[in-house]
Image: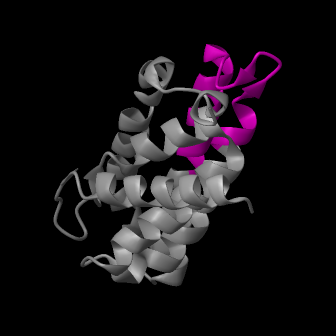
Amino acid sequence: MRTRQMILTALFIAIVTVSTYIRIHVPLGTGGLIHIGTLTMFTIALRFGPRYGAISGGVGMALFDIFSEWAIWAPGTFVIRLIAGFVVGYIALSKKGQGENRVRNLLACLAGGVIIVAGYFIYEGFFLGTGLAAVASIPGNVAQLIIGLLAIFILPSIPRLEDLQS
């Protein structure tokens, strides 16, 4: 990994971690956590691609979990957000460039949202042993998806990777 890529990766991880702290706290067992970390992860994945989306989302949000009362979610968050960030960035790549096609961007965010909603349902239901009580987390995760969709509107104001390399 080149120095510039390492710096951008660390920067994006830090931005996702910090943006996840900008949240509405919802009590445990009543729908989860609503924050703008998903918006940040989607924006990074759309503009900078699957690698940055995956690493910044997976590591950044897992770090948030580790340093908060949500630590038990960190392993699930790491895997779920890693996959979601990769998928969003991968789908958003078009012939025009990374994140340059609005339809692909919408499909990318929707696919990422499905991964997040299903991933947390599976993680909570099976790995944390809450069973069908994991259904309670679905509204909060859908809210995350809705907030994340704002990335499509923010994206035009974010410079391309090529613009950052000059």
Residue 148 sits above or below residue 86 on the image:
above
Question: Residue at the location (45% across, 63% down)?
Answer: 60
Residue 103 sits above or below residue 79 on the image:
above
Question: Residue at the location (60% across, 34% down)?
Answer: 46
Q: Main secondary structure of the magenta part?
A: helix
- Left or right: 98 in relation to 156: right
**Closer-to-camera residue (66/33):** 66
* Residue 41 at x, y percent in the picture: 49, 46
* Residue 24 at x, y percent in the picture: 17, 52
Q: Image quadrant for the C terminus?
A: top right
Q: Image quadrant for the N terminus?
A: bottom right
**Closer-to-camera residue (65/107):** 65
* Residue 68 at x, y percent in the picture: 26, 76
Question: Residue at the location (44% across, 20% down)?
Answer: 157
Q: Quadrant of residue 94?
A: top right
Query: Is residue 138 covered in magenta?
Result: no
- Left or right: 121 in relation to 134: right
Query: Is residue 104 covered in magenta?
Result: yes
Q: Which residues are drawn in magenta?
A: 88-115
* Residue 112 at x, y percent in the picture: 59, 44
